[in-house]
Image (spheres, helix red, strand yellow):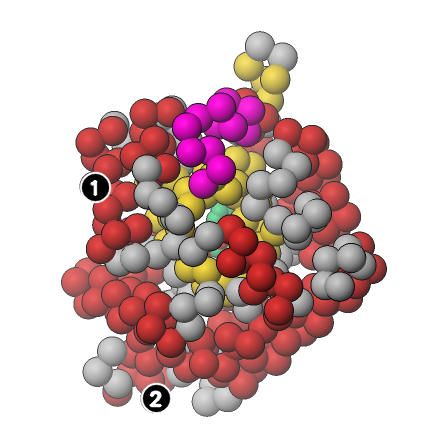
Amino acid sequence: MTTNQLISEIKKKKSFLCIGLDVDLDKIPTFLLDEEDPIFAFNKAIIDATHQYAVAYKPNIAFYEAYGLKGWKSLEQTINYLNENYPEIFTIADAKRGDIGNTSTMYAKTFLEALDFDSVTVAPYMGKDSVEPFLNFKNKHTILLTLTSNEGAFDFQTKKIEEKELYKEVLEISKTWENSERLMYVVGATKAEYFREIRKIVPNAFLLVPGVGAQGGNLSEVCKYGLSADVGLLVNSSRGIIYASTENDFAEAASNEAKCLQNEMEAILKSQLPDFNS
Ligand SMILES: O=c1ccn([C@@H]2O[C@H](COP(=O)(O)O)[C@@H](O)[C@H]2O)c(=O)[nH]1
């Protein structure tokens, strides 16, 4: 998917909501466990109930790998379902990969070619040659971990190297790479006070923002400085939506939760970017 297609979808739905599909078999309604593929059955019900409010879905790969081959099959079923039924929706493999070049090429092929996600999250720690293989894929996106939502982000990411914080180096250096227009960046919603600085370096890039909901991040604080002229944000909530209820009404509860966030986003767009939807 191109960035312009993503922006059109945001415009159409008045939403920049990304829903995280982090499925834990211990948390889904027990009646689904009788299904042949309970993870896919859960995801399908969540997607069907929430797609009108969301522009992106983000399965975190750990939640699939944890179930071995069955988990990988559920992941494949989920991405195929999204691509076949909701091709206008942006998909993110939250895999946090990155390795020496030839290995990164294989990771890139796994998520962007074999599974056909629109994007994949990548750790920048190993540098340019570890990220480049992901950037070779046309109309696909590489989402670099920049300033993560967890407390441990302060261990390295905000530390100064020759006067500049590491997360700023990630932004500035990656901007110079070939095909850098295919880059997006992960910035945690719990780090709202950093968005102003981040937008000075990447005014137009898309930021994937996890951490609202269960981690306590605040949507309006993120949007205060996080919005770009074309919105430029994909705000993710996983547990807050998909486990809004763990009873039989789970899909309806997820839909209500997603609708609430979409309503909030619509109001923010109206007040902060009045020209965006006109
Ligand atoms: O900095 C980061 C990077 C990734 N994540 C992932 O996003 C979701 C958040 O889930 P919630 O249930 O909404 O807290 C999850 O998959 C994380 O691994 C992140 O939280 N922070």
SS for callout 1: helix
The residue at 46%/33% (across/down) is 180
The residue pinned by badge 2 equals 31
The residue at 42%/65% (across/down) is 21
Q: Is residue 32 above or below residue 200?
A: below
For disc 1, the neighbor class at 10 Å (few under 14, some 14 to 19, many from 20) is some
In which quarter of the view is residue 9 placed? bottom right
Residue 106 disc label:
1
For disc 2, the neighbor class at 10 Å (few under 14, some 14 to 19, many from 20) is few
Q: Which percent across, then down, holds residue 41?
A: 33, 80
Q: As shown in the figure, which amino acid type bears the numbered disc 2?
A: Phe
Q: Residue 215 versus residue 163: which sits nearer the camera?
A: 163
Q: Is residue 172 magenta?
A: yes
Q: Residue furthest left?
A: 69
> Could you give the CA–CA distance between mark 1 and mark 2, rounded to whole angstroms?
37 Å
Residue 171 disc label:
none
In which quarter of the view is residue 213 placed? bottom right
Examine the rendering and report whether any part of residue 254 can be seen.
Answer: no
Q: Is residue 96 left or right of residue 164?
A: left
Say which of marks 1 and 2 sits in front: 1
Q: Which percent across, then down, holds residue 229?
A: 70, 47
Q: Residue 179 versus residue 258: which sits nearer the camera?
A: 179
Q: Where does the magenta region start and end?
A: 171-182
Q: Is residue 100 above or below residue 63?
A: above
